[in-house]
Image (cartoon, rainbow, N blue to C red):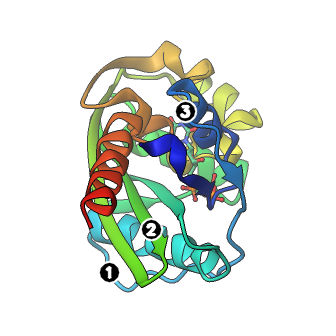
Amino acid sequence: MIRDYKIVLASASPRRRELLSQISLNPVIEPSTVIEVITTRVPEDAVMELSLQKAEDVARHQQPGTIVIGADTVVAAEGKILGKPKSHQEAYEMIESFQGKTHQVFTGVTLIYCGTNGTTVRSFAERTDVHVYPMTPEEIRLYAEDEEPMDKAGAYGIQGRFAAFIKGIDGDYSNVVGLPVGRVYQELKQICEQEEKA
Ligand SMILES: Cc1cn([C@H]2C[C@H](O)[C@@H](COP(=O)(O)OP(=O)(O)OP(=O)(O)O)O2)c(=O)[nH]c1=O
């Protein structure tokens, strides 16, 4: 059973911790300190690559019987990968590029099971399509000036004030917030079942 394992979340994101506690998983928080390197421009591959780097960094110093979760979220809009904005101006430009349109949010997740005879690694990427209402330059400016977009991929938080501009989504909502918890739970269950059979 999942509760027989120690779960470590290799992330500083409070949203990811909250999403796991929503499904009664209360992980130990150990953010990774790895320098993130992307070697691809394909968003689903990039988020898996980054989630693997974060999970591997933290898995290195774990005891057997631990499962480490690493994750990374990006927005893909108009052929570009958008991470966190570096300035309010950049936040404005990101939102301007996808207002009135549909973009994709990808979260990559890596689960590493640390066993007595080595490790098991599983990575996957989950996609959600997000439809955004047209926004006026004033609406974009007021939102981009706020602190809310600054620590978020694509410069918005669907769970925050930006909800005013969300027309709809196709896919998992929790994936947009930073962790597709349903899929994470199913994958964790499979790791535990495999270990119990072995
Ligand atoms: C699109 C979107 C992203 N986000 C967040 C999820 C992620 O926390 C963040 C993307 O940054 P990430 O680099 O994926 O994660 P992080 O830096 O917050 O945490 P860590 O690297 O330690 O795991 O954007 C929202 O909260 N709401 C949204 O609507």
The percent position of residue 53, horizontal first and vertical second, equals 51, 78
Residue shown at the point (68%, 80%) measured from the top left = 61
Is 59 located above or below residue 51 in the figure?
below
Residue 161 lies in what quarter of the image? Answer: top right
Q: Tell me if I can see residue 93 in this picture.
A: no
Q: Quadrant of the C terminus?
A: bottom left
Is 167 located above or below residue 9 in the figure?
above
Q: Is mark 2 within 8 Å of ligand 1?
A: no
Q: Give the numbered dot on residue 113.
A: 2
Mark 1 vs 3, N-terminal side: 3
Provide the secondary structure element on which disc 2 rests.
strand
Q: Amino acid at mark 2?
A: Tyr
Judged left or right of residue 83, residue 35 is: right
Q: CA distance from mark 2 to mark 3?
A: 20 Å
Task: Residue under label 3, please give it.
Answer: 19
Q: Tell me if I can see residue 38 in this picture.
A: yes
Provide the secondary structure element on which disc 1 rests.
loop
Q: Give the numbered dot on residue 40.
A: 1
Judged left or right of residue 156, residue 128 is: left
Residue shown at the point (40%, 45%) measured from the top left = 97
Q: Quadrant of the N terminus?
A: top left
The percent position of residue 112, horizontal first and vertical second, equals 45, 69
The 10 Å Cα crowd at callout 3, few under 14, some 14 to 19, many 20 or more, is many
Q: Amino acid at mark 3?
A: Leu
Mark 1 vs 2, N-terminal side: 1
Residue 34 lies in what quarter of the image? Answer: bottom right
